[in-house]
Amino acid sequence: MNQTVKIAPSVLAADFARLGEQVAQCEAAGADFIHIDVMDGRFVPNISMGMVVVEALRKVSRLPLDVHLMILEPERYIADFALAGASHILVHAEATPHVHRAIQQVKEHGLAAGLVLNPGTPLDFFENLLPDLDEALLMTVNPGFGGQQLIPSSLQRLETLRQMRDQRNPNCLIEVDGGINLETAPQLVRRGADILVAGSLIFKGDIAHNIAALRKSYAP
């Protein structure tokens, strides 16, 4: 699927005092999505932004808002994030015993639905749900904090997921999140990534330059 790889800047790494301005810079530089990490301090140790930030960014950006719910029982909040302006909602397989219900709930709101797996979670969790998914997000670091190094075993997991996706739902986009830099991006694209979520790489320094460099790193 990765003829045109999409870039999704993760605003977790942005300067929150200049959040609207930096998102506008991402949009002007050709970013495809804005990735928003929602953390509850329970499913992951960190606490981050919620519906208010999604609503604020919806007012200042035309880009799809890719909302990654790193929260327990995400089905409790799907309707609220949909109302706030999310375009895509992604839930973790590990965060709810009712993951199929949560995916269906996202789709009932007319949004793109994604399933996320942590590095230690078997890929089997994707298999039965792939036909219902718009995005399959593979965490390539342990979730909760930015700036981590990519876990090397993620590369083989990505290849396996690509094969599974190609068989079960070729229209599902494969998204990778964690440790993406100018060295790891081309490796991930070669193995099947359609969407690259990048935070520190994009928001440290000149945003337009960093997005251009990321695209160049995996160009044929």
Image: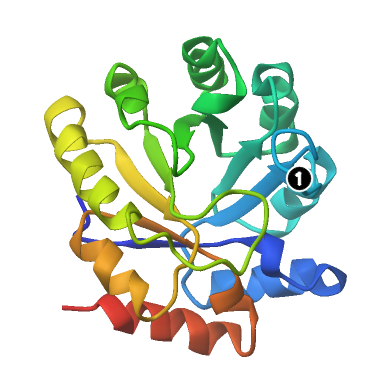
- In the picture, the quarter occupied by the C terminus is bottom left
Packing grade of label 1 (10 A; few <14, some 14-19, many >=20) is: few
- One can see residue 41 in this view: yes
Pointer 1 residue: 45
Q: Which residue is at the front of the view, 59 or 79? A: 79
Question: What's the residue at 65%, 38% (across, down)?
Answer: 70
Q: Quadrant of residue 10?
A: bottom right
Whole-percent x, y for residue 192 in the image? 22, 54
- One can see residue 170 in this view: no
Whole-percent x, y for residue 60 in the image? 73, 59
Report the side of 202 relative to 182 (left or right): right
Question: What's the residue at 47%, 36% (across, down)?
Answer: 116
Question: What's the residue at 55%, 50% (across, down)?
Answer: 142
Whole-percent x, y for residue 109 in the image? 57, 20
Q: Which residue is at the front of the view, 120 or 109? A: 120
The amino acid pointed to by label 1 is Pro
Q: Secondary structure at mark 1?
A: loop
Question: Is 148 rendered above or below residue 48?
Answer: below
Report the side of 193 relative to 94 (left or right): left
Q: Which residue is at the front of the view, 4 or 205? A: 205
Report the side of 83 relative to 4 (left or right): right
Report the side of 59 relative to 112 (left or right): right
Question: What's the residue at 32%, 45% (across, down)?
Answer: 174
| Number of numbered markers | 1
Whole-percent x, y for residue 102 in the image? 55, 16
Question: Is 77 rendered above or below residue 13?
Answer: above
